[in-house]
């Protein structure tokens, strides 16, 4: 699809104040962002006959990632305590773009990550720091992208399992580190890491689903802890973890969740906000825009592939089998237009919104959201399968590789490390039966 949606729906070009004539800081910021984005869309309409404004500038982004891999700019020196994340952002972004990971880069990445491994289990954000669930997620998923079995053998999976159990609370939650805070992200990080390493035992999963369900807000989204405000990042983490456990239908009000997810897409911008009354942000292209692909694995999602479903307030969230069910409960084309027109830095890298600077975090998650908007999935025999159908805005060369809806790394990378882990079980650890696993039956764009 190369025609801008505004060319056929000019009413979307009209901005308006939705503050009941009582201006607030939030409404004024929203108006400013809408004006900035409207100017970009109008310019794209005027120049579309000269060139395709919807081009993914792949070489520029690859060059940006190579620069980050070599040396961080001074402005990012504070991220030295998040080194596994930086490795993950670079490798994952390159993998989505189809950039070959050189042997030198893979070896450097593996060596760097393994230096962060705590001898008592888990990975830290930097050398000599304490193990933390967030960098542990980043390190293990980045090592999956390295695809080096020697590096995988260097992961102390027995110590990892013991450490994860120490992070586990009786109510099914996890603290992020020894003496740290409970956070729904911890549940997601712990369960996804355990699944990749084949150490997802009943002791680890006990009561996790109940805690996830308790984090669902009355609005439909999920919060960091029970009784807090729903947020896009926690919603993705909670839904993905619940699906991994095959418990989403049992513990979540999915129609209410689907409505909340739909309502986070901004009508003019086309991108997503993370919470009510907040601004659009490119990273929520994945944190919110990735939720529909995860819901395909639920009983609700599979049922809605065949039937039209309405929420309590009659907002249609799924149309018919011809439209892909829950995977089409948001405007995939509008999201891609926002990313391609508003989130690409001229010098390479991707960003939050216009007038912001690119950074590795937004580069990774904006590209993840673009991939999620381009690809459709089915769920067959307990496995995610990349469908033949795609939704590509702009040139066909914009198509990115498909990422696993739960793990957010390439499907083939998940399959490879899971197969290795199953073939090399940890003595004394008996994992629960595998769920929500990837399928090797993927489209050409999703394989290496």
Image: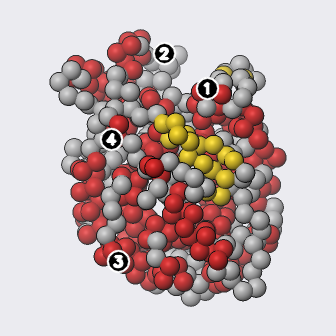
Secondary structure type for disc 3: helix
Rendered view: 429 above or below 325:
below
Rendered view: 393 above or below 293:
above
Q: Residue furthest left?
A: 50
Among numbered discs 4 and 1, the one appearing first in the sequence = 1
Q: Residue at x 43, y 42 (%)?
A: 370
The tag on residue 5 is: none
Rendered view: 266 above or below 232:
above
**Residue on which the image places disc 1:** 322
Secondary structure type for disc 4: helix
Alpha-carbon neighbours of circle 1 within 10 Å: few (<14), some, or many (≥20)? few
Alpha-carbon neighbours of circle 3 within 10 Å: few (<14), some, or many (≥20)? some
Q: Residue at x 58, y 78 (%)?
A: 122
**Residue on which the image places disc 4:** 397
Give the Cα distance between marks 4 and 1: 25 Å
Q: Which quarter of the picture shows residue 207?
A: bottom right
Q: Is residue 151 left or right of residue 93?
A: right
Alpha-carbon neighbours of circle 2 within 10 Å: few (<14), some, or many (≥20)? few
Rendered view: 247 above or below 13:
below
Number of marks drawn: 4
Give the Cα distance between marks 1 and 2: 42 Å
Among numbered discs 3 and 2, the one appearing first in the sequence = 2
Q: Which part of the image, by quadrant, shows the C terminus?
A: bottom left
Q: Are discs 3 and 2 less than 8 Å apart at CB?
A: no
**Residue on which the image places disc 2:** 21
Is any part of residue 46 visible from this angle?
A: yes
Among numbered discs 3 and 4, the one appearing first in the sequence = 3
Q: Residue at x 76, y 60 (%)?
A: 208
Camera-side residue: 257 or 53? 53
Q: Residue at x 60, y 39 (%)?
A: 292
Give the Cα distance between marks 3 and 1: 46 Å
Q: How is the image coloured?
A: secondary structure
């Amino acid at each position: 699809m190369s025609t801008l949606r505004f060319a056929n729906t000019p009413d979307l070009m009209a901005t308006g104040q939705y503050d009941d004539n009582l201006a607030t800081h939030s409404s004024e910021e929203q108006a400013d962002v809408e004006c900035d984005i409207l100017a970009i869309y109008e310019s794209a309409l005027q120049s579309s006959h000269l060139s395709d404004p919807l081009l993914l500038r792949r070489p520029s982004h690859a060059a940006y990632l190579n620069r980050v891999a070599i040396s961080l700019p001074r402005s990012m020196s504070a991220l030295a305590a998040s080194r596994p994340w930086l490795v993950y952002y670079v490798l994952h972004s390159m993998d989505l773009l189809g950039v070959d990971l050189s042997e030198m880069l893979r070896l450097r990445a593996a060596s760097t990550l393994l230096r962060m491994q705590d001898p008592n289990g888990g990975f830290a954000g930097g050398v000599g720091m304490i193990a933390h669930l967030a960098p542990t997620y980043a390190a293990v998923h980045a090592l999956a992208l390295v695809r080096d079995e020697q590096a995988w053998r260097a992961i102390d999976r027995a110590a990892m399992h013991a450490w994860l159990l120490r992070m586990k609370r009786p109510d099914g939650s996890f603290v992020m580190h020894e003496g740290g805070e409970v956070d729904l992200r911890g549940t997601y990080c712990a369960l996804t890491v355990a699944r990749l390493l084949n150490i997802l035992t009943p002791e680890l999963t006990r009561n996790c689903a109940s805690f996830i369900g308790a984090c669902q807000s009355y609005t439909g989204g999920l919060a960091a802890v029970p009784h807090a405000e729903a947020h896009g990042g926690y919603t993705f983490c909670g839904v993905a973890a619940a699906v991994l456990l095959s418990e989403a239908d049992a513990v979540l009000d999915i129609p209410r969740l689907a409505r909340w997810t739909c309502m986070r897409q901004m009508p003019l911008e086309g991108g997503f906000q993370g919470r009510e009354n907040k601004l659009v942000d490119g990273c929520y292209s994945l944190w919110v825009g990735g939720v529909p692909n995860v819901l395909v694995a639920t009983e609700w999602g599979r049922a809605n592939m065949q039937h039209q479903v309405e929420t309590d307030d009659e907002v249609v969230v799924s149309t018919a089998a011809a439209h892909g069910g829950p995977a089409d409960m948001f405007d995939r084309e509008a999201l891609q237009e926002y990313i391609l027109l508003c989130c690409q830095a001229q010098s390479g890298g991707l960003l939050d919104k216009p007038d912001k600077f690119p950074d590795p975090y937004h580069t990774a998650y904006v590209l993840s959201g673009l991939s999620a908007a381009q690809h459709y999935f089915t769920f067959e025999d307990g496995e995610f399968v990349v469908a033949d159908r795609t939704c590509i805005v702009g040139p066909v060369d914009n198509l990115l590789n498909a990422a696993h809806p739960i793990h957010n790394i390439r499907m083939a990378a998940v399959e490879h490390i899971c197969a290795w882990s199953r073939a090399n079980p940890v003595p004394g650890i008996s994992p629960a039966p595998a769920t929500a696993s990837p399928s090797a039956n993927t489209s050409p764009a999703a394989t290496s």
